[in-house]
Image (cartoon, grey):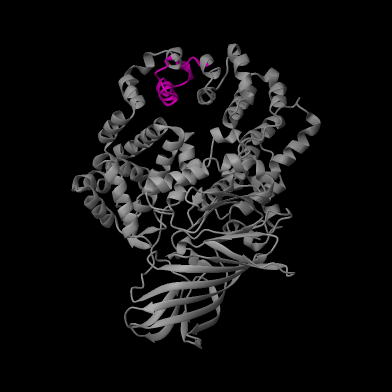
């Protein structure tokens, strides 16, 4: 489970870098945006003000797939040239001049702006949201793919007034008149890179908190999710207050917003002052133990300093974003959940990093093409070790000096190290060689750090060689062992054959019971009465596992198990409900007259109105029990073009498997003839329509 969560939490981290315009400096921008959702286009305008630093014959902006209606320089038409990805202003600019550039355009974004729910019959699920990470804002705004062009933005957005509009900065006003559309005006007081510009439009309510320092924290949610606000945003104010104090530099923006969006590409994205995150993390209280938003919450908030206030200069400096956000998220979790939680989290990532390193696949933190695992987890380790080497006081002083010196600017790893060396009075050559430059993960150094700082891990390294000789009871009953240590020692014992499961599934600790559920397969008759209560345990993962294991193990009581769990939906991915429907269809004597409705509901979960996790599991179950129909084929064909590459790849793999079956192929061809050309992009190489 830890690996699954880790993979899901890691946001996409590869940035691309455009050509930096070192002869001009764009200062301010006023934007006007009017999305046209039915056409999936944006009517826009922008007024840029910029200074000329050196004589130059033209100035360019990144602008992908745009039609320009007006291009004026200082109030006059100016010669310009457009290409597929840029617009160039052809004019002799002289050093020392200041100019105003006006662009009016229509954008047809192929990515970056996502129009969700506008082509279905579900009222109220319409959304528009952006994801510009790296170099993508230029799909909807003539802007700068390079991170070094920092601008103070003002956004004016026109949208149907029945929706909520959220964007960077402070909302100055919203027009309120008899018109169908309203105007929302947002203002930023400080400059930022254009890849961090964002807006979201949809049906939202919000909770407003205030930090100890007086910053408004706006937590958005769907109107029907009021009971999920507390568990979803649990610890938000505490995290905010802690990070301000721990980092030592005040939150740098006017306010902070968190917005769940449907079909998001990653776990979260740290747009300046406005984090967008997947609504798969909007949870109820029971879900909190299984999968919560706390780490993502802290990670994206930390980016407001590390990445947004101070921004990397080049791709080899990416550690300054993701390593720092990961480290400070872990430190925030340490404050909330305990020291033990923090050090065991580092222990888990050290094992993964060491395994990769031993395979010869380790990476330097300065490698611009390094993996997410390297930038995030090895990066967090590097900061933990830096703090350990120079001491907490000097570390905090160095971090504060670094942020103040380079605020609203771009920076390199070398410049960061120089600030830390100055603050600590130490030469960090050895630290750089081991933690930044080397491809090898220094597992012995990491182990010594963990042993020094965690009594629980110190006990683990003393006991690990003997763990297989301990009985399950001995491990569970030892009061000196923390839950983390018990779980690791139990894991060392191997599969369920080596474990005494009865004391595990009746343990008072919910995480121990969850571990037992994960270890169970075929349940012996003698454990049935102890296992059954886990069907209703306070963990949806445990509910799901035990439903399947009990159903598989005791066919004579299948209707009993299904009846007990018929009202459980589970996590936001509907893990329990989807399994329940599948097993109900496979249990002939359970409500046979209702089977058609169970099948219809399961098919319905393949629809685009549900998030990719729900859809993927529904596709999987329907395929495994071979009850596909035309609606499933239609939704699958559309899914092969989904904007999330992970889900799109799954859909294409499943489609290819079905396509190789002649009977299924005929059904797919029949359905495909009912779809429009845009739905058939993936199929055009396979179908002759």
Q: Quadrant of residue 251?
A: bottom left
Determine if residue 553 is in view.
Answer: no
Q: Residue at x 56, y 17 (%)?
A: 506
Say above or below: 649 vs 184: above
Quarter that holds the C terminus: bottom right
Q: Nearer the viewer, residue 298 or 17?
A: 298
Residue at the farthest bottom position: 76
Task: Give the number of callouts.
Answer: 0
Looking at the image, residue 354 sits to the left or right of residue 569; the answer is left
405 inside magenta stretch:
no
Looking at the image, residue 669 sits to the left or right of residue 53; the answer is right
Q: Residue at x 56, y 20 (%)?
A: 522
Residue at the farthest right position: 593
Q: Nearer the viewer, residue 84 or 398?
A: 398
Looking at the image, residue 570 sits to the left or right of residue 7; the answer is right
Q: Residue at x 73, y 68 (%)?
A: 180
Determine if residue 458 is in view.
Answer: yes
Q: Nearer the viewer, residue 465 or 521?
A: 465
Where residue 247 appears, as percent x and y from the top left, is: 37, 48
Say above or below: 62 vs 204: below
Q: Residue at x 63, y 24 (%)?
A: 535
Say above or below: 183 vs 447: below
Where residue 32 appears, as percent x and y from the top left, is: 57, 72
Where residue 232 appears, as percent x and y from the top left, is: 57, 42
Q: Which residues are magenta?
A: 478-501
């Amino acid at each position: 489970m830890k690996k699954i969560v880790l993979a899901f939490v890691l946001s996409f981290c590869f940035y691309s870098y455009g050509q930096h315009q070192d002869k001009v400096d764009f200062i301010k921008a006023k934007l006007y945006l009017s999305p046209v959702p039915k056409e999936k286009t944006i009517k826009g305008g922008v007024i840029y003000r910029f200074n000329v630093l050196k004589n130059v014959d033209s100035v360019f902006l990144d602008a992908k797939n745009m039609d320009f209606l007006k291009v004026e320089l200082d109030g006059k038409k100016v010669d310009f040239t457009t290409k597929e990805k840029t617009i160039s202003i052809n004019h002799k600019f002289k050093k020392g001049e200041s100019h105003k550039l006006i662009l009016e355009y229509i954008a047809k974004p192929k990515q970056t702006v996502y129009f969700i729910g506008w082509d279905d019959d579900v009222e109220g699920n319409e959304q528009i949201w952006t994801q510009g990470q790296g170099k993508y804002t230029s799909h909807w705004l003539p802007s700068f793919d390079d991170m070094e062009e920092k601008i103070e933005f003002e956004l004016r957005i026109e949208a149907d007034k029945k929706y909520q509009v959220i964007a960077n900065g402070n909302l100055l006003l919203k027009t309120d008149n008899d018109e169908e559309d309203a105007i929302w005006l947002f203002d930023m007081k400080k400059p930022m890179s254009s890849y961090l510009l964002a807006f979201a439009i949809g049906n939202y309510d919000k909770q407003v908190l205030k930090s100890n320092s007086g910053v408004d924290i706006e937590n958005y949610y769907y109107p029907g999710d009021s009971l999920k606000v507390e568990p979803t945003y649990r610890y938000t104010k505490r995290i905010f207050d802690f990070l301000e104090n721990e980092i030592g530099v005040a939150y740098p923006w006017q306010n902070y917003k968190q917005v769940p969006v449907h079909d998001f590409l990653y776990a979260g994205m740290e747009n300046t002052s406005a984090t967008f995150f997947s609504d798969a993390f909007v949870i109820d209280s029971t879900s909190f133990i299984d999968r919560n938003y706390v780490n993502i919450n802290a990670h994206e908030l930390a980016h407001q300093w590390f990445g947004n206030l101070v921004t990397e200069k080049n791709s080899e400096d990416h550690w300054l974003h993701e390593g720092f956000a990961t480290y400070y998220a872990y430190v925030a979790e340490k404050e909330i959940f305990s020291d033990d939680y923090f050090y065991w989290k580092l222990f888990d990532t050290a094992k993964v990093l060491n395994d990769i390193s031993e395979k010869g696949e380790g990476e330097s933190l300065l490698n611009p093409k390094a993996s997410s695992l390297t930038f995030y987890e090895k990066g967090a380790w590097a900061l933990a070790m830096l703090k350990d080497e120079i001491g907490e006081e000097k570390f905090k002083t160095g971090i504060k000096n670094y942020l103040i010196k380079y605020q609203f600017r771009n920076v390199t790893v070398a410049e960061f190290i120089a600030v830390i060396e100055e603050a600590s009075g130490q030469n960090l050559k050895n630290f750089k060689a081991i933690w930044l430059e080397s491809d090898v993960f220094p597992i012995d150094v990491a182990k010594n750090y963990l042993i020094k700082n965690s009594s629980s891990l110190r006990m683990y390294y003393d006991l690990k060689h003997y763990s297989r000789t301990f009985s399950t009871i001995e491990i569970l009953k030892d009061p000196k062992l923390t839950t983390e240590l018990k779980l690791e020692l139990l894991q060392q014992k191997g599969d369920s054959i080596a474990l005494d499961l009865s004391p595990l599934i009746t343990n008072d600790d919910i995480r121990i019971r969850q571990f037992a559920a994960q270890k169970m397969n075929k349940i012996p008759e003698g454990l049935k009465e102890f296992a059954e209560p886990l069907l209703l345990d306070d963990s949806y993962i445990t509910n799901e596992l035990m439903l399947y294991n009990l159903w598989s193990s005791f066919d004579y009581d299948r209707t009993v198990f299904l009846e007990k769990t018929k009202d459980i939906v589970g996590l936001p991915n509907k893990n329990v409900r989807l399994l329940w429907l599948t097993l109900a269809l496979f249990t002939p004597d359970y409500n046979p007259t209702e089977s058609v409705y169970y099948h219809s509901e399961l098919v319905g979960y393949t629809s685009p109105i549900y998030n990719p996790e729900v859809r993927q599991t529904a596709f999987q179950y329907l395929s495994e029990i071979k009850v596909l129909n035309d609606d499933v084929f239609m939704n699958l064909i559309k899914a092969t073009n989904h904007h999330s590459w992970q889900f799109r790849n799954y859909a294409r793999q499943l489609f290819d498997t079905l396509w190789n079956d002649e009977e299924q192929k005929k059904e797919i061809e029949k359905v495909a003839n009912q779809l429009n050309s845009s739905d058939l992009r993936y199929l055009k190489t396979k179908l002759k329509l």
